[in-house]
Image (cartoon, rainbow, N blue to C red):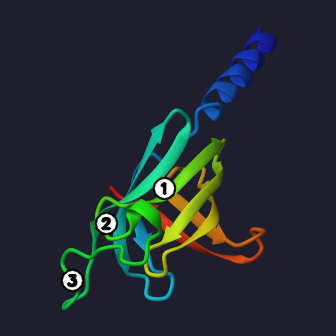
Amino acid sequence: MLCWVAVALLLGGQASSADPQTVAGVWKQIDPDTGKVGALVTFTETGGVFKGAFSKLYLDPGDDPNPLCRKCPGSQRGKPLLGLVFIDEMRRSGLKYDGGTILDPETGTSYSANMKLSPDGNTLTVHGYVGIPLFGQSQTWKRAQ
């Protein structure tokens, strides 16, 4: 009897760890210098690939109410920031996401990117870098409720 209980607990533990939450949903992009929410980012998944787009912008007084991505490359140049996909090609491996890119709309520069989701699914660390991940910057975002 004790053996069956151990097997049931083991299999139950494996089932719950096999399906961690994903980044799909809405996140608060938090400025690491000010602590202010700058935008809401909505992540979607298609065919195992995750992408993030600006779904709400928190603008300062006097800012353009409909900002455009004036320095973005290619077909994104001149597009509204609202709805702009700026994180793309992220592929999930458990709580980690790799192989993607992140676009800085202020400079038009794209960086390699990875992300890590907290075990509770409520905190996301987004890391953009050049070359190797050691050379980069991270932001910690919170899931919007």
Choose mark 2 or mark 1, whichever is in front: 2
Position of 144 with respect to 45 (left or right) is left
Furthest residue to the front? 74
Q: Amino acid at mark 2?
A: Lys
Residue 110 rendering spot, x and y as whole percentages: 57, 69
Determine whether the residue tagged by mark 2 lies in a helix, strand or loop: loop
| Pointers 2 and 3 in contact (C-beta within 8 Å) | no
Position of 58 with respect to 72 (left or right) is left
Look at the image and tell me whether residue 69 can be seen.
Answer: yes
Give the residue pinned by disc 1: 122
Look at the image and tell me whether residue 21 can be seen.
Answer: no
Determine whether the residue tagged by mark 1 lies in a helix, strand or loop: loop
The quadrant of the rendering that contains the C terminus is: bottom left
The quadrant of the rendering that contains the N terminus is: top right
Q: Residues within 10 Å of mark 1 (few under 14, many from 20)?
A: some
Which of marks 1 and 3 precedes in the sequence?
3
Q: Residues within 10 Å of mark 2 (few under 14, many from 20)?
A: some
Choose mark 2 or mark 3, whichever is in front: 2
For residue 28, what is the image quadrant?
Answer: bottom left
Q: Amino acid at mark 1?
A: Asn
* Vertical side of 102 occupied by 45: above or below: above
Give the residue pinned by disc 2: 79
Q: Amino acid at mark 3?
A: Asp
Nearer to us in this view, 26 or 79: 79
Residue 82 rendering spot, x and y as whole percentages: 28, 64
Nearer to us in this view, 131 or 79: 79
Residue 74 rendering spot, x and y as whole percentages: 45, 64
Furthest residue to the bottom? 62
Name the residue located 56 percent from the left edge and 36 percent from the top edge.
Answer: 48
Give the residue pinned by disc 3: 64
